[in-house]
Amino acid sequence: MSNNIPIMTLDGPAGAGKGTVSRAIAKTLGWQYLDSGAIYRSLAIAVQDAGVLLDDIGGIVDIANKMDLRFGSGEAPSVFLYGQSITDRITSETCGHITSKIAANGLVRQALLQKQREFCRFPGLVADGRDMGTVVFPEAKYKVYLTASAEERAKRRFKQLKEKGIDVSLMGLAKEIEERDRRDMERSVAPLKMADGAVLVDSSDMRIDEVIDRCLGLLAA
Ligand code: DC
């Protein structure tokens, strides 16, 4: 499937630091970066914009098959849906919540599979998500399950949103993260779990550079 292109997968719950760590690893190695969560989140935005209801799976799959989605190539993450920037819209907690509901459906996940696999190009790929090492790239040579305590993850996400000027309550955020984790882990299709052969990294008490070094260390092992 990946034609010997090296792949590192990073799966884990919301707020574990996967995005920051994956981006840094991809930059260090000069590899492609797949933010699979952004693809799912973009679909949620496209579904909302089209006025399609969340239980209309046929309608959602149709949008997933047709949506024109592009990622900016600059340093800062940017996402364009039908040519319009949706970068800010996809980062909201509400979007994350709706996304997690849509992502629980197998037909929806199937429709997004190819889009994700297209990111696998030379010289390598860092793939960030929930099922990167289990379903999308099971053949990946380097697999990480990145987690942190629920409290630490809520705090980090709170700080991130505050920095963006988004007002949220820490308690509300912790509750939403917990609910989203449960849904992502308990769904019957491609649930969040440790892939076979994955290395567990608990970043609760680690600095971000330590997490990055730990993941990069896998290449040397
Ligand atoms: O990583 P994220 O927070 O941007 O992901 C948002 C939601 O998308 C997450 O709660 C579940 C879903 N998702 C998924 O089901 N599979 C992925 N590979 C990535 C994200």
Image (cartoon, helix red, strand yellow):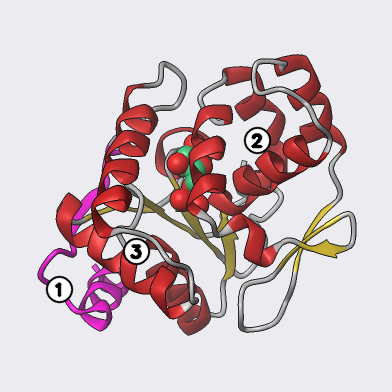
Q: Is 10 colored magenta in this rendering?
A: no
Q: CA distance from mark 3 to mark 2?
A: 27 Å
Q: Find residue 220 and report its horizontal and vertical position in percent.
A: 28, 73
Q: Which mark is residue 157?
A: 3
Q: Find residue 47 and report its horizontal and vertical position in percent.
A: 75, 35
Q: CA distance from mark 3 to mark 1?
A: 16 Å
- Residue tagged 2: 113
- Residue tagged 1: 206
Secondary structure beneath dot 3 equals helix
Question: Is the residue at mark 3 in contact range of ligand 1, meaning its CB lies under 8 Å from it?
Answer: no
Q: Which mark is residue 11?
A: none
- The three-letter code of the residue at mark 3 reads Arg
User: In the rendered image of this protein, does residue 178 appear above or below residue 56?
Assistant: below
Left or right, 124 with reference to 14: right
Displayed quadrant of residue 43: top right
Mark 3 and mark 2 lie on one chain; the one further toward the N terminus is 2
- The three-letter code of the residue at mark 2 reads Leu
Q: Is 203 colored magenta in this rendering?
A: yes
Left or right, 198 with reference to 79: left
